[in-house]
Amino acid sequence: MMRYKILLLSTAGPLAVLLLLSGCEQKPQIRQYTEIDIRESRFEDIPAHQGIDRGMPSAQSQMQTDPSMDMSSADSATQQMINASVAEVSMTWTVPDGWREEPSGGMRLATFQSSGDDPVLCTIISLGGMAGGIEQNITRWMGQLGIQNISQEQLQAFIYNTHDVSTASGESAAVFDFNRLLDPAGHAASSMMAAILEGPSKTVFIKMTGSQDAVAVNAEKFTALLASIQMK
């Protein structure tokens, strides 16, 4: 059976790659989706990997060797790679209490939003190959959140200092909490929690965004969503 491994990434406050309004008494909902490849993957140059490689070159390290490559161009290049590699995946999940699932299309397998005055948005997408690599996606998301002046040592410590969550089908989820990189006083600042479920030929991104406070409040529900995932 094909095994996957998930990486969770979290920040208080895109592969940005998810949430909706729902009553607390709403019974958990289970959905199953299959998204079909719409373009040929452009990751042929990325070798097949065993498990999650957390040591792939990041956009930050690329910029150190190529002065002409700034964060905006790195983000644009990664986004083009994302748009070019939507992949097929079959999976089910349980919608957390207090979240509502909304219609999705295009790259998104699912979209969710939490209830309340300070909601979070959560999305699930599936892409072919590595979709840019672990470090490159983390660095890109840091740029989107305005997280700057992070050394390579701090970046590596952030990537490797994780805890694991198991999905319903046995994948291991490594959690990255971006709140650790943000000013605790910036309650309303944009933040994120993201999960990367990585297999030999595709990568599934589950990303939750909102204010620092909203992401912190919904962290357990995001973890519950990941724990409910069943890969087919």
Image (cartoon, helix red, strand yellow):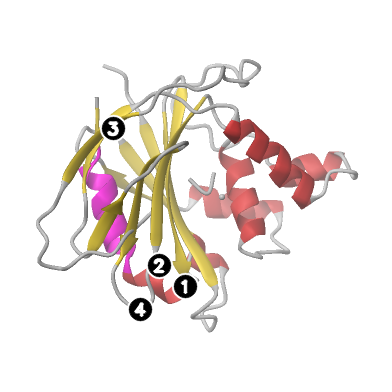
> Residue 215 — which label?
2
Q: Mark 2 to mark 3: distance in Å? A: 25 Å
Quadrant of the rendering where the N terminus is positioned:
top left
Most extreme residue toward the bottom is: 185
Answer whether labels 4 and 2 touch (C-beta < 8 Å).
Answer: no
Give the answer, above or below, for where 99 lies relative to 216: above
Answer whether labels 1 and 3 touch (C-beta < 8 Å).
Answer: no
Of 94 and 68, which appears nearest the observer? 94
> Residue 212 — which label?
1
Q: Secondary structure at mark 2?
A: helix
Image: magenta residue range? 218-229
Q: Amino acid at mark 1?
A: Gln
> Residue 33 — which label?
3
Answer whether labels 2 and 1 touch (C-beta < 8 Å).
Answer: yes
Q: Amino acid at mark 3?
A: Tyr
- Magenta segment, principal secondary structure? helix
Q: Amino acid at mark 4?
A: Asp
Of 135 and 31, which appears nearest the observer? 31
Q: Mark 4 to mark 3: distance in Å? A: 29 Å
Instruction: Judge depth for marks 2 and 3 and give the one in front.
Output: 3
Q: Taking 68 as reference, is 97 left or right?
A: left
Of 203 and 20, which appears nearest the observer? 20
Within-10-Å neighbours for mark 1: few <14, some 14–19, many 20+: many
Residue under label 4? 117
